[in-house]
Image (spheres, rainbow, N blue to C red):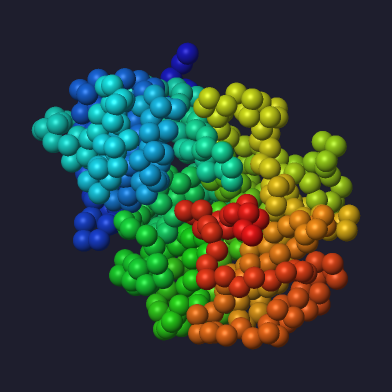
Amino acid sequence: MGDARRRNLSLFLDHQVDAGRADQAAVICGDERVTYGQLLERAGRVAGALHDAEVRREERVLLLLDDTPAFPATFLGAIRLGAVPVPVNPLYKASDFRYFLEDSYARVVVADAAFAEKAAEAIHGLDGVRVYEPADLLEAAGDAEGLPAAATHEDDMAFWLYSSGSTGRPKGVVHRQADAAATCETYGASVLGLTDADVTYSTTKLYHAYGLGNGLSFPYWVGATTVLTPGRPSPAAIFSTVETHRPTAFFSVPTLYNALVNAEGAKGRDFSSVRICLSAAEPLPPEVFRRFEDTWGLPILDGIGSTEMLHIYCSNTAEARRPGSSGRPVPGYELLIRDDDGHPAAPGEVGELLVKGDSALSGYWHHRDRTRRTLIGEYFATGDRYRADEDGFYWYEGRADDMIKVGGLWVSPIEIENVLIEHWAVLEAGVVGVDVDGFMKIRAHVTLRPDLVDPGEGLIGELQNLCKERLQRYQYPHIVRFEKDLPKTMTGKIQRYVLRGRQ
């Protein structure tokens, strides 16, 4: 095996230092600025400390870390050693952490002080499992220079991300040393076009595939700066961060874009530093797109990605965008829509979306059967239903288990939700199919603007008529429920399976 296929993800840092950017800010977090030279040193010292703690090549290391400089130092430090970091949502319960430990066989947990108590509860009774705080690893390394990057192969395991499916336990998604670079060479190059002068800011956390690209892979690939913010993102915190640190590339999700345009005083907030806005995790409603552009003059480039493909593989671009669509395939990826019989779908026909690209997962840990079902030759079967129009734009129709069949006709919940939020009174909407006396009915769960105390009897009829006018006559909610809020995942996706279960 020659050196041509040797690759270690932590070398992103070495390359920037070698390119003369040792003093360039890699991370800004509050008042702290960490340069590429400093981050490389920290990653090397973490690698050395993990080595001294007898962590070995390909051994998993569970990370319970918020978005601070400790995350990239620990994540890349573990990879530098040849170990496999497994970042998870630190807000999960101790019982969830226990599951991740038992599933991954991790013997080391690195946790922020705020999560140390939950980590200690999670490891109770597990022999040989230890918990470290990030500072412990740096102190353990002392004045040591740190380890050089291990000579790992591009196909070696680099890191895992646990996918959050709608049902069942999360599954460990295994990614290679080469996968992050593949996203940089495709989406990063053709959609983002970042340079070392850019500053990125993502409201999605680093433990998530979308956030990992936004706040680590893409900026470190070109020597840009990224802004990290611990804690839950809120409109007030987002506005403050943008106005203080002046990012040029802003990454968020539809739920938060919607919250920003509806926030009090939004029109007076300063987004002038931002040149490009990106969205993922779920489809961006056209109405939110329009409101955001009307408010700040910035179009949002929506796209679709997944934990399994690591980042976005189909996206709108500055040159070609169509509100409501997921855009066109990102150069470097191939998309295929197959019908219910497994054949390529006809133009305009709805079917399951398959994607092929170099950033695809190696497989699901401990889920061989699922790996075999979803990896079909060189393609990954997404489970998302899509249609492609005559111009090559892809339109999301919902997950396979979200589609509703009414009177023998398929209905996409996304289409109805997008129309509902066009109504001035509606903030968010979630649409599901429910059984009523043996017949499938469409039920909409709607949240209203906070200043609307009494929706009035006529609002349900208005919403139903709006859908009938904008869509096919059968594509309207038979039942409308007004809710205080909608159940969502940590990344802002509406949990329709929870809505279906509500009585």
Residue that appears at 42% across and 57% down:
202
Using the rendered image of the protein, determine whether residue 242 is visible from the camera's viewpoint.
no
Question: Outermost residue toward the top?
Answer: 1
Using the rendered image of the protein, determine whether residue 204 is visible from the camera's viewpoint.
yes
Q: Is residue 468 above or below residue 123?
A: below
Residue that appears at 53% across and 49% down:
189
Q: Is residue 309 left or right of residue 116?
A: right
Residue that appears at 68% across and 62% down:
431
Q: Is residue 466 left or right of residue 293?
A: right
Q: Is residue 44 left or right of residue 164?
A: left
In x, y percent, where is residue 73? Answer: 28, 40
Q: Nearer the viewer, residue 290 or 431?
A: 431
In x, y percent, where is residue 318? Answer: 59, 63
| Quadrant for the C terminus in the image | bottom right
Q: Nearer the viewer, residue 452 or 347?
A: 452
Q: Is residue 424 above or below residue 25?
A: below
Q: Is residue 49 above or below residue 321?
A: above
In x, y percent, where is residue 363? Answer: 56, 28
